[in-house]
Image (cartoon, helix red, strand yellow):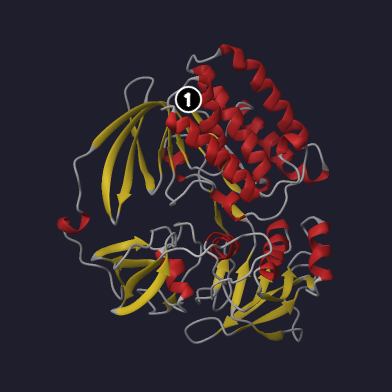
Amino acid sequence: MRIQNHPIIDFKQKKKITFYFNRRKLEGFEGDSIASALYANGVKVFTKSLRYDNPRGFFCGIGKCASCLMRVNGIPNVRTCIAPLKENIKVETQEKLPALSSAEFNKQHKKTLTVDLLVVGAGPAGMCSSIEAARQGASVLLVDENMDVGGQLIKQTHKFFGSKQERAGTRGIEIAEELKKEIKKLQEQKKINLMVNSTVIGYYEGEKGKHRFGVVKRKGYSSIFYEVVCRAVVFSCGAMENMLLFPGNDLPGVYGAGAVQTLMNVYGVKPGNRVLMVGAGNVGLIVSYQLLQAGVQVDRVVEAAPVIGGYHVHAAKLRRCGVPIYTSYSVKEVYGRNCVEGAVVVKLDENWNPIEGTEEKIKCDTVCLAVGLTPSTRLLSQAGVEMEFIPEAGGYVALHNRFMETTVDNIYVAGDSSGIEEASTAMIEGKIAGVAASLKLGYNQNAKKLLKQYLEELDRLRSGPFGEKPRIAKEKITKFLEKKT
């Protein structure tokens, strides 16, 4: 299942790593996650559901679901999609709820860190927030639960649109490398402290004018617990994949689009051989083309809406490659014994109801769901930030002003956590949040001009026809905020 040739990404041969899965000896590569190494070895079933004993496999690829929980070196509930592969580890499926003992947690003494700014999430928004705040003089702790920084950027092989300021014509993977280098430079200058393989697990009341968080850093497969005290925080936690309801939607082989990108573009592993893509927004169209680049056949793209939602330039590329796009169509069911073996698609009427007699059975081993995202806002809610449900933003979002500050003093939000948009807008929102937070903390008042520049850039980016939805979302957020104040 390894990708041998790719037109853009060079999957260089890395050091081989031996590990064991249910006592069977397997091989992976340095840099693999446990889940990607298993998948590359043809293992699709990672665990089974507790109630129905149904097989479960890779789904989100970013540690947001429970489909990949396994026991590693005796430690239960390891999220194998974000856990690094190590030499000679023993990976086992969990057939039932694990019996936990305090020894299995291997807790170490709590450590305390004090910083000016905590940034939660090292995707495009979080990296830009950290860089901007550090440049203004604030001390920054950047936390991410993945093995490396970059978020969605490290999966994006397509070239960005927009202006020069938004890096038009540059691939997401290249932008990620540029930002990584800047973060590394600021790390060397002791301006940014980076903690990967780490999860912010909770918000706690701090002293007046300060915020307090619990952070778990994974060291191997055990944990170190930190208490982080900060004067301000930027939540750039990203988003979670949406799910569709249909029979068979829990079979291994049904993935979110981000998981497909993770397997292909991060680990160089094919998600399957023949794919049904559900959703013709930008994500569905772009990922379909990326599948073709990886040597995977895309049977078709089905879209429930009567029109294609993404840029037509992306749709045209697919059609030139012979991939049909069916509008007013959706998936009715997915079938297979232990993994996906095929699917049934059906035509929808003007009220989005299935039209009887239009069902078509297709052979595929993968169903990719590109049906939107929901902002990750749990920590924001826990911190007491005012939330509102705004459909144009993707769901419940934190109320925030134009400087990305929420209703709680010195708590900021940026990127998909503030409303679903493109990576370009996430980066600018991150810059705004980083500069605004450092200004409020008393650093470099000359940065007010820079803040104004970023606000103008964001307005320009949203001024086109594809910016209409986020413009409406931000207007609603502003109106809700005015009512609250």
Figure quadrant of residue 190: top left
In this view, 440 is above or below 308: above
Residue at image location 55% in from the left, 66% down from the top: 268
Q: Quadrant of the C terminus?
A: top right
Amino acid type of the residue that numbered disc 1 sits on in the rendered structure: Asn
Quadrant of residue 311 within the rendered picture: bottom right
Is 57 on the left or on the right of 448, as rendered?
left
- Point out the image quarter for the N terminus: bottom right
Question: Residue 74: x, y in percent?
Answer: 23, 66
Please report the residue visible at 22 percent of the width from the left and 39 percent of the height from the top: 110
Residue at the spot x=63%, y=82% of the render?
A: 364
In this view, the residue in front, 397 or 12, is 12
Structural crowding at the residue carrying mark 1, measured as other residues with C-alpha within 10 Å and reported as few (<14), some (14–19) or many (≥20): many
Count of numbered labels shown in the rendering? 1
Q: Is residue 233 above or below residue 20?
A: above
Does 118 sit left or right of 75 as displayed? right
Residue 109 pos. (x, y %): 19, 41
Judge whether residue 210 can be spotted in this image: yes
Which residue appears at 35% of the width and 20% of the height? Answer: 208
Which image quarter: residue 195?
A: top left
Which residue matches tag 1?
410
205 or 262, nearer to the observer = 262
